[in-house]
Image (cartoon, rainbow, N blue to C red):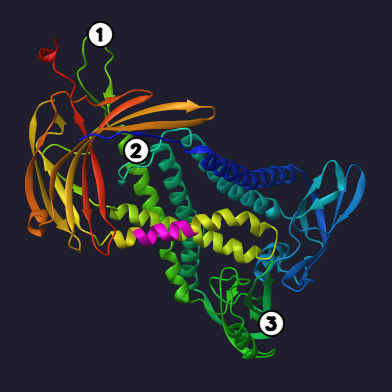
């Protein structure tokens, strides 16, 4: 039987608008990252000049968030004039870790006869701005941190800009809407998504997990040392509408007759929500309390109170799914791209058309199910990643104007959650396997189609196999690309409501003698599908299709 087709609009202004908004919004991160990289290179290019340290002490920083700063003064000559500098970094005024400043200060305390009581008089090298010699800094770590920040922002922003461009590009292509099925993502867009997942996982693993693991291994050899608490407090890190807390115990200890200080509490560091537990730790260790700390014997200014990773060790598993999905997806994309096209014979005088590999493989059992497990895992991880990122951004900017920009992303996240739930439920539905002895079917030929149930739950109320022929013509209307679709052939191969017949059986496919062969042109296509429909009570229905090829006539069949 046949039925008339309808014109289906392409992606339209909606997707183009979303892609344009996504691209422009992501460009903000890219621009900020490039600007930070530029500033880091600008500061890194300042002139190195010898200088002399007059004062370098570590004191409490001003402000509600606490931390430490360098009370610093150094002298240098440039262009025949003397200057005094006070900046340790170009873009950073303080540090929450006493150890960070101690590692910079410690080399200035080392003299020919051993460790000195003060860095005053030590020789150093500072960086001077040639355009303004009064502007200088002592340590290049600030510019390095600015460079890393810029690389991260520009990298993430660049990847999201690529996604936006891919959305804009795909919006000009046709879309397949008839007969819902599990389809493969376009290779270019798939590469971008899988690359993001892989790089995100690799970045977390290599930038955070591996260094912390190596540091934990090193800490196992640190020596137990008695220390005294100097002061304790709960340090607060305030966001626009959220606050995190951290234990900040400053303690002193002696190694080799020299006094050192540190405020490092545990291996992971950082701050988190929940103030009560941190307050209890601080109250249990008032000033003057004797505690046991672990000290690095090679670098005695490095110490920690608690070197056990605790439940944070489970965080090491977090990037593994991202890396697995990213690597597996990239391999799948490259393998797919290497598959050769299948050429069919054509009439003399006509160009040879290339038909993509049919999904049905001759002699092999092909699975028909609404949702593949790999697709569900990909969508699940993407949904968790997307909503986790959006949730963090929402609570961190709640109440600010920036929240308005997150509304489209929040709506996408809710849609992804609904899709993930649907796909999860669909996983429990019936799974069918179909087999054909031939993948390319000649006109007027008959072939045996076999099916069997391959698992899943639920008893279908109805079961139907269809042979469908569809013509697709792509045309452009202004800036939009649309596809007109016409189902010119729809043949019921087998249909039943008997449960036993649904589980296993066989039927004959008859290809019409006047069937139009499969064809793929630049704007027109003739496609044939083997479709399975199963109505499942209380579960998503099985609606899946696989493309087959109806062969061009052989030479002996031509007039």
Name the residue carrying label 2.
334
Count numbered badges in the picture. Answer: 3
Number of other residues with Cα within 10 Å of mark 2, as a class: few under 14, some 14 to 19, many 20 or more: few
Q: Sequence order check: which comes first, mark 2 or mark 3? A: 3
The disc placed on residue 233 is 3
Any part of residue 322 in sight: yes
Please state the horizontal and vertical placement of residue 294, each as a whole percent of the image.
55, 78
Any part of residue 205 in sight: no
The image shows residue 335, relative to residue 424, as above or below, that is above
Q: Is residue 319 left or right of residue 364?
A: right
Q: Nearer the viewer, mark 2 or mark 1?
A: 1
Q: Nearer the viewer, mark 2 or mark 3?
A: 2
The image shows residue 8, relative to residue 232, as above or below, that is above
Task: Estimate the spatial distance between the alpha carbons at disc 2 and disc 1, rounded to whole Å.
Answer: 35 Å
Q: Is residue 78 left or right of residue 427?
A: right
Q: Nearer the viewer, mark 3 or mark 1?
A: 1
Number of other residues with Cα within 10 Å of mark 1, as a class: few under 14, some 14 to 19, many 20 or more: few
In the image, the segment drawn in magenta is 414-422
Q: Secondary structure at mark 2?
A: helix
Q: Sequence order check: which comes first, mark 3 or mark 1? A: 3
Please state the horizontal and vertical placement of residue 76, each as a whole percent of the image.
85, 51
219 and 350: which is toward the camera: 350
Name the residue carrying label 1.
349
The image shows residue 559, relative to residue 404, as above or below, that is above
């Amino acid at each position: 039987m046949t039925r008339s087709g309808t014109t289906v609009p392409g992606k339209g202004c909606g997707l183009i608008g979303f892609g344009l908004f996504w691209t422009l919004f992501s460009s903000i991160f890219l621009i900020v990252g490039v600007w930070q990289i530029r500033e880091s290179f600008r500061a890194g290019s300042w002139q190195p000049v010898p200088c002399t340290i007059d004062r370098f002490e570590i004191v409490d920083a001003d402000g509600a968030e606490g931390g430490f700063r360098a009370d610093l003064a150094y002298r240098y000559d440039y262009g025949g004039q003397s200057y005094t500098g006070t900046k340790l970094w170009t873009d950073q005024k303080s540090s929450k870790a006493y150890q960070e400043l101690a590692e910079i200060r410690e080399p200035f305390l080392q003299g020919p006869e051993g460790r000195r009581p003060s860095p005053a008089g030590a020789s150093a090298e500072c960086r001077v701005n040639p355009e303004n010699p009064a502007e200088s800094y002592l340590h290049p770590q600030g510019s390095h941190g600015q460079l890393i920040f810029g690389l991260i922002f520009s990298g993430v922003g660049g990847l999201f800009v690529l996604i936006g461009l891919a959305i804009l590009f795909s919006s000009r292509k046709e879309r397949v809407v008839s007969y819902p099925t599990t389809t493969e993502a376009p290779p270019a867009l798939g590469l971008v998504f899988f690359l993001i997942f892989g790089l995100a996982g690799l970045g977390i693993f290599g930038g955070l997990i591996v260094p912390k693991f190596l540091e934990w291994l090193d800490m196992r050899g640190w020596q137990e040392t008695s220390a005294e608490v100097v002061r304790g407090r709960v340090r607060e890190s305030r966001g626009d509408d959220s606050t995190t807390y951290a234990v900040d115990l400053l303690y002193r200890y002696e190694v080799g007759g020299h006094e050192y200080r540190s405020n490092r509490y545990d291996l992971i560091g950082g701050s988190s929500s929940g103030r009560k537990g941190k307050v209890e730790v601080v109250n249990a260790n008032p000033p003057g309390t004797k505690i046991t700390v672990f000290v690095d014997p090679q670098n005695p200014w490095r110490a920690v109170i608690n070197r056990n990773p605790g439940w944070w060790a489970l965080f090491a598993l977090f990037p593994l799914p991202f890396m697995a999905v990213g690597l597996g997806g990239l391999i799948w994309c490259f393998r797919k791209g290497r598959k050769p096209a299948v050429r069919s014979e054509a009439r003399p005088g006509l160009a040879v058309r290339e038909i993509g590999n049919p999904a049905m493989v001759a002699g092999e059992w092909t699975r028909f199910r609404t949702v593949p497990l790999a697709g569900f895992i990909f969508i699940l991880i993407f949904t968790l990643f997307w909503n986790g990122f959006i949730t963090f951004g929402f609570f961190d900017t709640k109440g600010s104007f920036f929240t308005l920009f997150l509304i489209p992303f929040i709506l996408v996240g809710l849609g992804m959650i609904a899709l993930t739930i649907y796909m999860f439920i669909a996983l429990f539905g019936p799974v069918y396997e179909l087999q054909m002895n031939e993948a390319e079917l000649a006109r007027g030929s008959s072939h045996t189609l076999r099916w069997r149930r391959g698992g899943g739950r639920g008893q279908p109320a109805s079961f139907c196999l269809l042979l469908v022929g569809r013509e697709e013509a792509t045309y452009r209307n202004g800036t939009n690309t649309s596809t007109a679709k016409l189902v010119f052939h729809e043949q019921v191969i087998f249909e039943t409501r008997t449960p036993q017949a649904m589980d296993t059986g066989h039927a004959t496919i008859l290809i019409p003698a006047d069937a139009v062969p499969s064809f793929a042109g630049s704007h027109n296509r003739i496609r044939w599908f083997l479709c399975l429909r199963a109505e499942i009570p209380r579960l998503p229905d099985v609606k899946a299709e696989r493309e087959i090829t109806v062969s061009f006539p052989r030479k002996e069949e031509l007039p």
